[in-house]
């Protein structure tokens, strides 16, 4: 029964992520004054890629990389509350597990792309892992403010205690939420923090050697990651509610990120990490300080 | 285990980090470039030699291919070279139409440039906007000349045909659109704090270095040196027109972009004056029979200000019906090879494409 439920969640979230991606492409197109592809374009892309043969592999790890990334992200679905529906697994401390699982995917990408030995991929990986030092810290600090206040490290409990609309954590924890939103931009790899892919600089970075099924798997990973990452933010700061409100909230958060993505150039890697360790760090630490005073 | 000192990577010829068919071979230590070598040869078509086998008039359709983003400078240079050798008089209306075409081409080249730099910075909205706005200019070209990119419009003796009815109003409408859009570009692009943060103080070129290396055009003016062929060695009707030569100074990526941004407005100003001042009259002089058109033995160097710098043609005639030698002096050879190879050393990996785009290198004109 649990397995069936999990597969339903997996398929639903994947479809949702692909749909979000498609709508984001349309939305970006409208900002850029063009027509844009249809909203279901991402489904077509993934089906096409999954139906293709792989012409060249660079070794075992190259093939395993996308699989590790995909595994990491689908495992995180076990711990993600979807609105008021209890996640398949929840226990005290599951938020740490979720953070840990979110790191598996970039590491899988790093292992796989590293095997290809393309310098563009290597630079992309180095950038990705460096950037992680920035956003992981900030996101974690902003979540810690909530954890300290609610005296729990379970994502499900945070959602449960928080309740619905007027009691959203966004309002009392607006400093932490703001810092978390900036961290989320980096976590999702949207501009100004998209230096992992950076087409003009390193020709799409870690993805550069991938084709066919592997690329399809990576796109699926990306689609699920959109929902998981925005979902994490929504669960911590934007309260519970029905699954429908969860979808609406994640969609709104993602669209905000996409809009910022369209109006910003990208940072240099040094600038990005320096930026994270300056303003968002101060804001998130202030958020924690506020909680300690408020207690 | 072998210690890796640096790693090599390429940008181009199939890479969004460089325009057109050329590549750069880079050696990086960490995030810093230690060596860069340009690699050309993907696009050599031998135009200079081909021109020696064709009648004077037959070269007209070939010259625009020398620079794809701004082909019209090649047409005007070839036409001016032949006119000076043959002693042809160009009607005044034709000269105004030539200035109109050249300045419209400059606008479209600058829009291309804005798109390139913004793309290298990752601000992908600007390329879409700029290419879209450039299309309005291409529509004008299509109506005037029949071609969107290669116009083959300016021939020795004048221009091929007169303005179509209602064309001036259409140009005014496009200019108004571009002026309106410029404020949007300012807000999203030129005043964007992150754009300034990424470009200011990066790849600084001093005035002395620029003069020593023979850097011309907006790249030279961005270092603070006021020089423009349109004023220094006037051609066509530019002396009759009022326009400023803006100078930014600073010599970094930011100044190079802002230099074009300021010149964009000046070009709009020039076109508006041209539309007002254009006299009536013929647009082309009578040319001799092209198969028996011999030009007496002489040589001439002509130059114009293109969007990329000083463009020059050295045209030699040996008294026959074909040119003896035509040498093309393009600004991209200097900017894309010598200067790029020296200045990109020490940059960060992320800044290399921005620097290369900010130099506005046009590979077809390096190789001809």
Image (spheres, coloured by chain):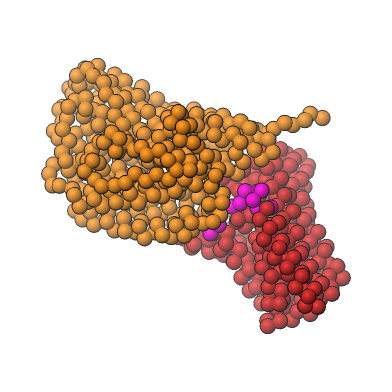
Percent position (x, y) of residue B255?
Answer: 47, 45
Spot the residue most to the right.
A92
Residue B43 appears in the figure: no
For the C terminus of chain B, the image quarter is top left
Q: Is residue A268 magenta?
A: yes
Please tell me which residue is depicted at 69% across the width and 52% down the height of the picture.
Answer: A273
* Image side of residue B282 versus residue A18, left or right: left
Please tell me which residue is depicted at 70% across the width and 41% down the height of the picture.
Answer: A122
Percent position (x, y) of residue B258?
Answer: 44, 48
* Chain the render paints orange: B
For the N terminus of chain B, the image quarter is top right
Establish if A244 lies above or below A17: below
Percent position (x, y) of residue B280?
Answer: 13, 47
Establish if A132 lies above or below A241: above
- B228 vs B160, nearest the viewer: B228
The picture quadrant where one finds residue B312 is top left
Please tell me which residue is depicted at 29% across the width and 19% down the height of the picture.
Answer: B324
* Image side of residue A122 versus residue B74, left or right: right
* Image side of residue B339 versus residue A137, left or right: left
Establish if B107 lies above or below A35: above
Q: Is residue A151 magenta?
A: no
Please tell me which residue is depicted at 58% across the width and 31% down the height of the picture.
Answer: B36
* Image side of residue B345 versus residue A117, left or right: left
Percent position (x, y) of residue A244?
Answer: 66, 77
Picture colour for chain A? red
Residue B244 appears in the figure: yes
- B100 vs A203, nearest the viewer: B100
- A3 vs A281, nearest the viewer: A281
The boundaries of the magenta stretch are: A263-273
């Amino acid at each position: 029964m649990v397995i069936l439920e999990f597969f339903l969640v997996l398929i639903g979230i994947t479809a949702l992520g692909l749909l979000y991606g498609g709508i984001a492409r349309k939305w970006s197109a409208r900002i850029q004054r063009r027509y844009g592809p249809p909203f279901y374009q991402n489904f077509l892309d993934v089906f096409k890629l999954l139906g293709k043969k792989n012409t060249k592999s660079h070794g075992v790890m190259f093939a395993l990389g996308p699989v590790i990334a995909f595994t990491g992200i689908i495992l995180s679905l076990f711990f993600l509350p979807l609105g008021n529906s209890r996640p398949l697994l929840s226990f005290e401390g599951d938020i740490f597990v979720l953070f840990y699982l979110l790191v598996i995917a970039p590491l899988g990408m790093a292992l796989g792309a590293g095997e290809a030995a393309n310098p563009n991929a290597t630079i992309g990986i180095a950038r990705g892992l460096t950037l992680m030092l920035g956003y992981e810290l900030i996101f974690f600090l902003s979540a810690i403010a909530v954890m300290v206040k609610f005296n729990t490290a379970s994502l499900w409990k945070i959602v449960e205690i928080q309740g619905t609309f007027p009691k959203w954590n966004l309002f009392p924890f607006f400093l932490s939420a703001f810092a978390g939103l900036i961290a989320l931009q980096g976590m999702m790899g949207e501009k100004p923090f998209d230096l992992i892919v950076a087409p003009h600089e390193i020709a799409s970075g870690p993805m550069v050697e991938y084709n066919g099924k592997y690329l399809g798997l990576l796109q699926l990973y990306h689609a699920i990651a959109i929902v998981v990452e925005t979902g994490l933010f929504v669960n911590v700061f934007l309260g519970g509610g029905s699954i429908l409100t969860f979808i609406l909230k994640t969609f709104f958060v993602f669209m905000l990120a996409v809009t910022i993505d369209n109006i910003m150039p990208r940072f240099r890697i040094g600038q990005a990490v320096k930026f994270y360790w300056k303003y968002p760090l101060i804001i998130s630490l202030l958020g924690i300080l506020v909680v300690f005073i408020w207690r | 285990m072998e210690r890796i000192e640096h790693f090599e990577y390429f940008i181009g010829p199939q890479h969004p980090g460089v325009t057109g068919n050329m590549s750069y071979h880079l050696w990086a230590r960490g995030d810093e470039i230690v060596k860069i070598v340009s690699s050309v040869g993907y696009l050599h078509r031998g135009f200079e030699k081909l021109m020696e086998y064709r009648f004077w008039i037959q070269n007209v359709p070939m010259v625009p291919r020398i620079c794809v983003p701004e082909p019209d400078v090649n047409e005007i240079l070839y036409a001016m070279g032949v006119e000076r050798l043959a002693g042809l008089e160009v009607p005044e209306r034709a000269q105004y139409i030539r200035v109109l075409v050249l300045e419209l081409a400059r606008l479209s080249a600058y829009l291309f440039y804005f798109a390139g730099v913004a793309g290298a910075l990752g601000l992908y909205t600007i390329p879409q906007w700029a290419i879209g706005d450039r299309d309005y200019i291409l529509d004008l070209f299509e109506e005037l000349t029949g071609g969107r990119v290669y116009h083959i419009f300016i021939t020795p003796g004048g221009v091929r045909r007169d303005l179509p009815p209602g064309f001036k109003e259409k140009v005014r409408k496009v200019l108004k659109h571009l002026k309106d859009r410029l404020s949007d570009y300012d807000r999203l692009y030129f005043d964007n704090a992150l754009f300034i943060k990424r470009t200011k103080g990066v790849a600084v070129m001093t005035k002395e270095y620029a003069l020593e290396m023979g850097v011309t055009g907006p790249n030279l003016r961005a270092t603070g040196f006021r020089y423009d062929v349109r004023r220094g060695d006037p051609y066509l009707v530019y002396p009759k027109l009022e326009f400023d030569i803006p100078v930014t100074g600073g010599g970094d990526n930011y100044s190079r972009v802002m230099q074009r941004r300021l010149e964009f407005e000046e070009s709009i100003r020039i076109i508006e004056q041209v539309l007002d001042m254009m006299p009536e009259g013929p647009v082309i002089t009578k040319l001799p029979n092209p198969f028996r058109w011999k030009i007496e033995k002489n040589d001439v160097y002509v130059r114009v200000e293109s969007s990329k710098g000083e463009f020059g043609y050295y045209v030699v005639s040996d008294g026959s019906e074909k040119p003896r030698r035509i040498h093309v002096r393009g600004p991209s050879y200097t900017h894309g090879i010598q200067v790029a190879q020296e200045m990109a050393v020490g940059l960060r990996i992320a800044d290399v494409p921005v620097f290369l785009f900010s130099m506005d290198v046009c590979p077809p004109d390096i190789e001809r």
